[in-house]
């Protein structure tokens, strides 16, 4: 599986995972999956409950990443392996 890039919101209740779609059939554009998850329990003890998946073109995913960072989201490692 491709490497994912994670963001967590300021109150540590929600995460977003950005991961490249390696099975994309489009020859002209690359796509990212953006998964939204809810933190349950203690951060790091249980994996987040993934609630939604969107597929965005790379440029749109970058815009979403920048928007979230400007809203106070922070980069986080995947701590629930």
Image: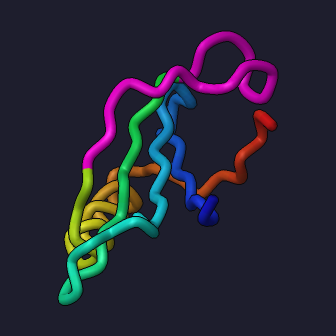
Q: Is residue 40 above or below residue 20?
A: above
* Place of residue 23 in the rendered image (x, y in percent of width and height, measured from the top left): 40, 66
Who is closer to the viewer here, 22 or 77? 22
Residue 5, quarter of the rendered image: bottom right
Q: Is residue 47 above or below residue 29?
A: above
Kindly identify the residue that appears in the image at 50 percent across and 38 percent down. 15
Residue 49 left/right relative to 65: right
Toward which corner of the image does residue 25 lie, by quadrant? bottom left
**Residue 75 or residue 24, whichever sits in front:** 24
**Residue range of the region highlighted in magenta in the rendering:** 39-54
Residue sitting at 27 percent across and 61 percent down? 64
Residue appearing at x 25%, y 70% in the figure: 63
Q: Residue furthest top?
A: 41
Q: Quadrant of the C terminus?
A: top right
Which quadrant holds the N terminus? bottom right
Could you say where residue 55 lies in the image, as x and y percent from the top left?
Answer: 26, 55
């Amino acid at each position: 599986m491709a490497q994912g890039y994670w963001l967590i919101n300021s109150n540590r209740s929600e995460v977003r995972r950005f991961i490249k779609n390696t099975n994309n059939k489009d020859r002209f554009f690359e796509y990212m999956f953006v998964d939204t998850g809810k933190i349950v329990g203690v951060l790091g003890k249980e994996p987040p409950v993934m609630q939604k998946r969107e597929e965005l073109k790379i440029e749109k995913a970058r815009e979403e990443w920048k928007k979230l960072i400007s809203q106070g989201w922070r980069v986080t490692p995947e701590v629930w392996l």
